[in-house]
Image (cartoon, grey):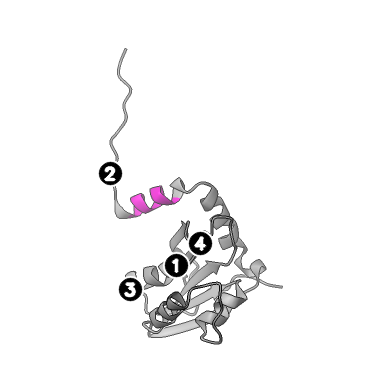
Amino acid sequence: MVRWTPPPRGWFKLNLDGSVYNDGSHRARIRDSTGRVVLSFAEKTEHSTVGIVEARGLGLDRVVAEGDDLVLVQLLRGEETQTRIPVALQQEIVALLRCFLGRDVRHVYREGNQVAHTLFRQAYEYPGVWAKIEDDRRGVAHQRAVPRAA
């Protein structure tokens, strides 16, 4: 049986969805040791360090990076390089990971990443939802639309 498991207490888990969408988008989610979502995002870009940069920006210092793309996991562990991601970006990713006091990179089968995969697929189909969630998190105010009296 395969399931999502929380990171150790005091750590955060960065779940990476290794799916390849036609436009090269990717998704990631950060959760704490209780499973509470700290950050989720979907992005239309072929290659990016956004998940790692966001974790650093949130001030997280102990991160488990977990994904279902074995090639990416091996790259993050420094076990091998590959041609799918530009060498300069590979070096940047490894350097960013070294900034964490604690880091662990793990492979998980797709079945253990189901919630992230499904939510990110839906977020990808409805990208405006994530922008609104981020607006709420930042406390963005919106003009009240009141219909005029007849």
* Of marks 1 and 3, the one in the foreground: 1
- Assign a secondary structure to mark 1: loop
User: Which sits in the foreground, 147 or 95?
Assistant: 95
The local crowd at label 4, few if under 14, some if 14 to 19, many if 20 or more residues have their Cα within 10 Å, is many
Q: Is residue 132 magenta?
A: yes
Q: Looking at the magenta stretch, what is its main secondary structure?
A: helix
Q: Which comes before the other along the chain, label 2 or label 4?
A: 4
Task: Tell me which amino acid carries mark 4.
Answer: Arg
Q: Verify CB contact (< 8 Å) between mark 4 and mark 3.
A: no
Q: Position of residue 100 (x, y in %)?
A: 38, 82
Mark seen at residue 141 = 2
Q: Quadrant of residue 74?
A: bottom right
Front-most of residues 70 and 120? 70
Question: Going from the N terminus, do you reach mark 4 or mark 3 first?
Answer: 4
Between the residue at mark 1 and the residue at mark 3, the CA separation in whole angstroms equals: 19 Å
Q: Which residue is mark 1?
A: 48
Q: Which numbered circle lies on residue 59?
A: 3
**How many angstroms separate mark 2 from mark 4 (CA)?**
27 Å
